[in-house]
Amino acid sequence: MQLTLDGISKKVGAEDWLYEMNLAPRPGAVTVLLGATQAGKTSLMRIMAGLDTPSHGRVQVDGQDVTGMPVRERNVAMVYQQFINYPSLKVADNIASPLKLRGEKNIAQRVRELAERLHIDMFLDRLPAELSGGQQQRVALARALAKGAPLMLLDEPLVNLDYKLREELREELTQLFAAGDSTVIYATTEPGEALLLGGYTAVLDAGELLQYGPTAEVFHSPKSLRVARAFSDPPMNLISAEAAVLGVKLDAGPELSIPLPAAASKSLTIGVRAGALRVGKREGDVALQGKVELAEISGSDTFVHVETSVGEVVAQLTGVHYFDLGAPITLYLNPAQVYVFDATGSLLVAPQRKAGR
């Protein structure tokens, strides 16, 4: 199914919720809507589903204009943040409900297959209220999958679950989506979730569509500072700089050998992902001297906040490391891993990607 948004926008009163945009998600693939809270993800999904109509523009499905067609007349499945199930129906009947509406055969077998895929087959005779939040969300997902709709919309479906459950379901969803034929639209605020789901990513910010493309391409080549900020967790380190003889001179810092386009502006901003900063020097690295402001361990990584001559930067170090607050520290970065943005915030230079990445 080809969903196409043609010049759609959404205005509520005098406020612009969505600015004019064009988007045609890849059929049969996952498209992640990535952006902070109030970026416009839910508003866009509601227009896709037929729950709202755009103020301007058209919504088309396989070339047919469906703008204004209500959701009940569209073949769409939706999963929300909340665990929305039929409270008076047992889990098996919740999952079976779309199958019964279509008058399908072998419903019990189909329900059990879906329940087994989502690891809730042992709860089929229970009511939703007897399940945990994660189990209830699995029921909602199973019912959406049972509908077999060509368009599946998931609005931050894991946000209310604890960390461990989110990790488990993310991996399962990636496999489920890969095995299906539906066009999946998945909204999230988390860059890591977008990278795990893969497929395609549309980056939204304050109601604007900033960039759409294969997820890896958008991550590695953000077309602007706004995209880079939205698609970095922890946030990308941004440092003021200017064009210099060797390439780029950091304000109050070293000079980096980075070839710039001939028309590059004098005023620049460089971006360094936290994972590109190291405490061990490698060939070609440039040193940043500083002192430790904060060190925090998260999972298997250590995040170190360092005050340097170019401002505070955050390094994401693999493994568990211990640092004394205020202690001197030297971070290293390779110019080949640096992003360069011009005075307008547009991308000038991106790190070269290794083959297969």
Image (cartoon, rainbow, N blue to C red):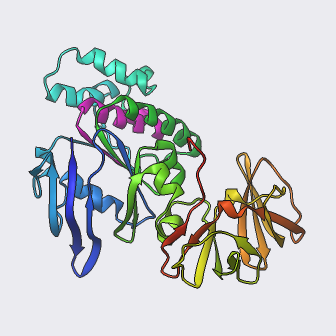
Choose top left, top right, bottom left or bottom right for residue 181: top left
Q: Which residues are magenta?
A: 128-154
Left or right? Give the position of 250 relative to 94. Answer: right
Q: Nearer the viewer, residue 200 or 118?
A: 200
Residue drawn at point x = 54 percent, y = 50 percent: 192
Q: Nearer the viewer, residue 185 or 336?
A: 336
Assess whether residue 148 is covered by the magenta stretch: yes
Q: Is residue 329 above or below residue 29?
A: below
Asked if residue 125 can be seen in this view, the reply is no
Place of residue 118 in the rendered image (x, y in percent of width and height, measured from the top left): 43, 28
* The image quarter in which residue 333 lies: bottom right
Q: Is residue 100 magenta?
A: no
Please name the residue shown 52% across and 82% down the image: 343
Residue 3, position as x, y percentages in the image: 21, 49
Which residue is more in the foreground, 299 or 28?
A: 28
Residue 279 screen position, x and y as percent? 82, 58
Q: Quadrant of the C terminus?
A: top right
Q: Position of residue 165 (x, y in %)?
A: 54, 39
Q: Main secondary structure of the magenta part?
A: helix
Q: Is residue 84 visible?
A: yes
Q: How many marks?
A: 0
Between 208 and 346, the one nearer to me in the picture: 346
Residue displayed at 61% across by 65% down = 236
Residue beneath the point at 30% across and 38% down: 28
Which quadrant, please, contains the N terminus?
top left
